Image: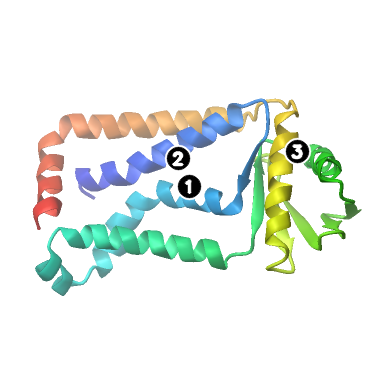
Amino acid sequence: MTAFSLVISLGPLALYFLALAFINSRKTPLVLNGNRDLFACSLGLIGFVFIGPVQLFVPAQALLVWKSAVWLLMLILYLLLVSTSMFLRRPQIVIYNISREQIRTVISDAAMELGQECVWAGGSVNFPDVGINLILNESPRLRTVSLLVAGYPGNLSELNRLERALAKCAARLETAENPIWKYQAILAVTLLVMVTGIVFFYHSEILAAFTFYATT
């Protein structure tokens, strides 16, 4: 693997872990739409996609015709594939830095905020007034809970209202920081130091590779 490949693959990944470390170091939970969470993960892996599938499957004829513009087209294609996955996947809400017990409190408060009734049944909660049924998928080690919508597509407008209410109620909840943020921060800083070192020692090689891709 070349120095240029290491930089463009590890750089976005380091920033992604740095963002996760910041989220988990907060003392309040963070509510994210599942599509935004997927998009952020896709950006973190974009460097690996470039040095892997993009390099492997880029059409040779396209390089001859569009030259360096083909890399922009491949980037657009990747983003289109990610966007398509976002539209086709089951809607979900992701809540970082929260326990299973706390999520029950937040959901109940959000239901009161919206003036709706919520009925719990094991690991799922139903909002009969708007026809939304959510399945709780918990990752105890990461202290992350995903709320998966059962019966897709469901009531998307009410789901968006519920997401905003959850975010509002979660902002009022005080919780302990997630200890995993320290490991994520260490990993992010390690990757950033590696990238910085590679750029410092192999800057001429990286510049040559960048010039090659920009003028091919």
Judge depth for marks 2 and 1 and give the one in front. Answer: 1
Instruction: Tell me which corner region of the image, top left, top right, bottom left or bottom right, holds residue 75.
Output: bottom left
- Most foreground residue, 113 or 6: 113
2 and 1 marks in contact (CB < 8 Å): yes
Number of numbered labels in the structure image: 3
Give the mark, 2 or 3, whose residue is nearer the N terminus. Answer: 2
Residue that appears at 21% across and 33% down = 199
Q: Residues within 10 Å of mark 3 (few under 14, many from 20)?
A: some
Instruction: Tell me which corner region of the image, top left, top right, bottom left or bottom right, holds residue 178.
Output: top right
Residue 128 x %, y % = 87, 60
Residue 180 x %, y % = 59, 32
Give the residue at mark 1. 40
Residue that appears at 75% across and 35% down = 169
Q: Residues within 10 Å of mark 2 (few under 14, many from 20)?
A: many
As shown in the figure, which amino acid type bears the numbered disc 1? Answer: Ala
Query: From this viewpoint, is residue 75 visible?
Result: yes
Label 3: which secondary element: loop
Residue 83 x %, y % = 46, 61
Q: Answer with left or right where residue 122 lies relative to residue 156.
A: right
Residue 197 x %, y % = 25, 30
Q: Residues within 10 Å of mark 1 (few under 14, many from 20)?
A: some
In which quadrant of the rendered image does the C terminus lie?
bottom left
Give the mark, 1 or 3, whose residue is nearer the N terminus. Answer: 1
* Direction bottom: furthest residue: 61
Give the residue at mark 2. 16
Q: Whole-Å distance between the Cαs marked 1 and 3?
A: 22 Å
Judge depth for marks 1 and 3 and give the one in front. Answer: 1
As shown in the figure, which amino acid type bears the numbered disc 3? Answer: Ser
Give the residue at mark 3. 99
As shown in the figure, which amino acid type bears the numbered disc 2? Answer: Tyr
